[in-house]
Amino acid sequence: MAERKAIPTNTRLRLFSGASGHCQNPDCLEPLFPVELGGDKHIAEMAHVIPHGEAGLRHEDRPDGSFDPDAFENLILLCSTCHTKIDKDPDSFPRNILLDWKENHLTNLAAKQGIRAYDDRSKARAAITGIMAENKAIWDRFAPEHGADFEYNPESEVAKGWSQRMRSVILPNHYRIQAIIRANLGLATEDERRAFAEYQEHVRGLSERHVCNVSGRAIRFPKAMEGLFS
């Protein structure tokens, strides 16, 4: 049997970003970086909707023609419990059900977290300020010297402690802030939309560093975000 290739970093990043730190089973939606694990590790598993090979779970749903089992479109991010559940009972979890989970994940997660569209900017502002304040407080207290510009050594004790807080608190907070802003982009000015685009790139870089272990690609937090919806 040929050695299976690792899932590419960009695909892993898209999966983690799209899941916003939560299992994509709508009946679960549990955090994938549980606080009780201290941010040391996640419980996420990249599950194949259609497996490798010519037979296996949900193989009757395999699309015709060229097909890459490791493509983003064929993967879903689940906690280990849900991964085991769908593989033990594939008839109850066909391809269309799993892809529906993935497509509607952010909507389901937003509903669970109470995220919604508001009718004025002050309400949208109030929804994000507390979360942003928590991230800033952790940054001020625990971020390595020089913040995003420090020479990143993932094996240092400073970097390990910082990454724990990043994965268990800061990144989940960022994902939630992004969901709130997306739900309320109709209230944003053109300048605020540009700031949000930069912010998304900032979070993407943090995810690359602290989830996918790709260092040196994060951009600074855009200062304009501090006044969003004000």
Image (cartoon, rainbow, N blue to C red):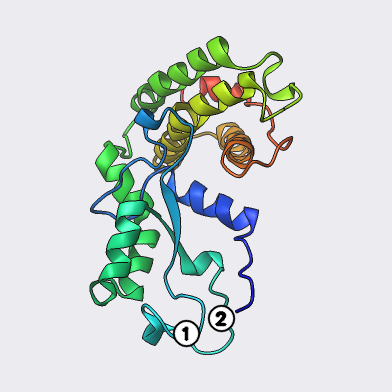
In x, y percent, where is residue 66? 59, 85
**Do residues under tags 2 and 1 come within 8 Å of each other at their CB atoms?**
yes
* Quarter holding residue 92: bottom left
Q: Residues within 10 Å of mark 2 (few under 14, many from 20)?
A: few
Q: Nearer the viewer, residue 121 or 107?
A: 107
In the rendered structure, the answer to whether residue 11 lies left or right of residue 74 reads: right
Q: Residue 227: percent from the left, percent from the top?
A: 52, 20
The residue drawn where x is 38% and y is 45% is: 22
Mark 2–mark 1 Cα distance, whole angstroms, equals 7 Å
Which quadrant of the structure image shows residue 77?
Answer: bottom left
Residue at the far front in the pictured view: 1
Q: Secondary structure at mark 2?
A: loop
Q: Is residue 17 left or right of residue 145?
A: left
Label 1 sits on what residue type?
Pro
Tell me residue 159's x, y (percent).
Answer: 63, 24
Q: Residue at x 63, y 54 (%)?
A: 10
Q: Which residue carries the number 2 mark?
A: 67
Residue at coordinates 44% horizontally, 33% vertically from top-left?
177
Is 155 or 164 nearer to us in this picture?
155
Numbered label attached to residue 63: 1
**Residue 183's quadrant in the figure?**
top left
Q: Position of residue 74 (x, y in %)?
A: 48, 69
Amino acid on which the number 2 mark rests in the picture = Phe
Q: Quadrant of the N terminus?
A: bottom right
Closer to the camera in the image, 223 or 209: 209
Residue lying at 60% horizontally and 23% vertically, measured from the top left: 224
Give me the disc on residue 91: none
Q: Secondary structure at mark 1?
A: loop
